[in-house]
C-alpha cells in the first residue's frame, strides 16, 4: 500500500488521516500470468494500480485479431477507463503478461473518497488529462510517423516494457505485422 500512497503523494498532499482513510479502501490482489484483470463486455468496477508485473490492454476485432492498446508495468494504471467512468460494459480486455500484484479500489469507494478527500479528485483529473494527451500524441504519431520511427520511439520512451513483452505484441501495439517488425529490426541491426 505504501507504494500506491507514495505514488499519489507525488502529485497531491495527503494528511495522515487521509492516507489512513484511502488505505482502508484499497485491496491488494495478485494475478497469475495469463489471468485477466478485466474482460470485454464486463463492467469495470475496479480502478487498478500495478505494484509489480506487466499487463496489456487489448481488443479483438471481428476476425479474432488482437489489437493492443497499451501496456502497463510498475507504477502504471491498468483497465478500461471508459468502462470505469461510465460503469458500462468494457470494450477492452486487460491481461497479465507476468505474475502481477495490484492495488485496486472500487468505483463506489472512489466516488465516496472524492467527497471525503477532495484533493483526490484533483489527482485523478490530472491523471486522466495526462492519459488524454498521451492518447492524442499516439494518434498523431500513428498517422505521421513511419513504422520504423514509431518502433524507435517506443524503444526510447518505454525501454523496460520493450524488454518485457514479446515482439509480436509490440508489433500489434504499433499497428504492424510481426513480420514487418522483424524486417525493421533486421534493418536496424545491419545499420549498427
Image (cartoon, rainbow, N blue to C red):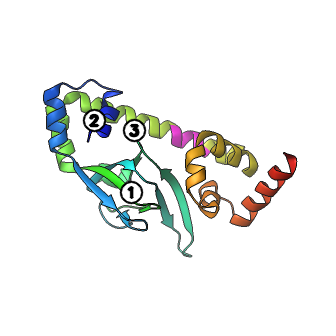
**Residue at image point 27% right, 50% down:** 104
Q: Residues within 10 Å of mark 3 (few under 14, many from 20)?
A: few
Task: Provide residue 55's location: percent of width, then percent of height.
Answer: 45, 56
Q: Quadrant of the N terminus?
A: top left
The CA distance from mark 2 to mark 1 is 18 Å
Q: Residues within 10 Å of mark 1 (few under 14, many from 20)?
A: many
Residue 121 lies left or right of residue 184; in this view the side is left
In the image, is residue 63 part of the stretch drawn in magenta?
no
Dominant SS of magenta comes to helix
Task: Provide residue 151's location: percent of width, then percent of height.
Answer: 69, 49
- 26 over 96 or under it: above or below: above
| C-beta proximity under 8 Å, tags 2 and 1 | no
Residue 33 lies left or right of residue 118; in this view the side is right
| C-beta proximity under 8 Å, tags 3 and 2 | no
Q: Nearer the viewer, mark 3 or mark 2?
A: 2
| C-beta proximity under 8 Å, tags 1 and 3 | no
> Residue 128 — which label?
3
| Highlighted range, magenta | 134-139
Q: Quadrant of the C terminus?
A: top right
> Residue 5 — which label?
2
Amino acid at each position: 500500500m505504501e507504494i500506491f500512497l507514495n505514488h499519489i503523494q507525488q502529485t497531491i498532499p495527503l494528511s495522515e488521516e487521509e492516507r489512513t482513510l484511502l488505505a482502508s479502501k484499497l485491496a491488494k490482489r495478485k494475478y497469475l500470468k495469463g489471468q485477466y484483470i478485466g474482460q470485454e463486455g464486463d463492467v469495470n468496477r475496479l480502478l487498478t494500480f500495478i505494484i509489480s508485473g506487466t499487463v496489456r490492454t487489448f481488443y479483438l476485432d471481428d476476425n479474432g485479431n488482437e489489437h493492443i492498446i497499451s501496456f502497463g508495468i510498475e507504477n502504471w494504471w491498468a483497465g478500461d477507463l471508459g468502462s470505469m467512468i461510465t460503469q458500462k460494459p468494457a470494450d477492452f480486455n486487460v491481461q497479465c503478461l507476468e505474475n502481477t500484484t495490484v492495488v485496486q479500489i472500487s468505483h463506489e469507494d472512489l466516488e465516496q473518497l472524492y467527497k471525503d478527500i477532495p484533493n483526490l479528485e484533483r489527482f485523478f483529473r490530472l491523471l486522466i488529462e495526462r492519459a488524454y494527451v498521451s492518447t492524442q500524441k499516439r494518434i498523431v504519431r500513428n498517422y505521421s510517423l513511419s513504422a520504423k520511427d514509431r518502433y524507435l520511439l517506443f524503444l526510447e520512451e518505454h525501454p523496460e516494457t520493450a524488454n518485457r513483452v514479446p515482439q509480436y505484441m509490440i508489433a500489434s501495439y504499433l499497428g504492424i505485422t510481426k513480420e514487418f517488425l522483424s524486417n525493421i529490426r533486421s534493418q536496424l541491426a545491419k545499420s549498427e
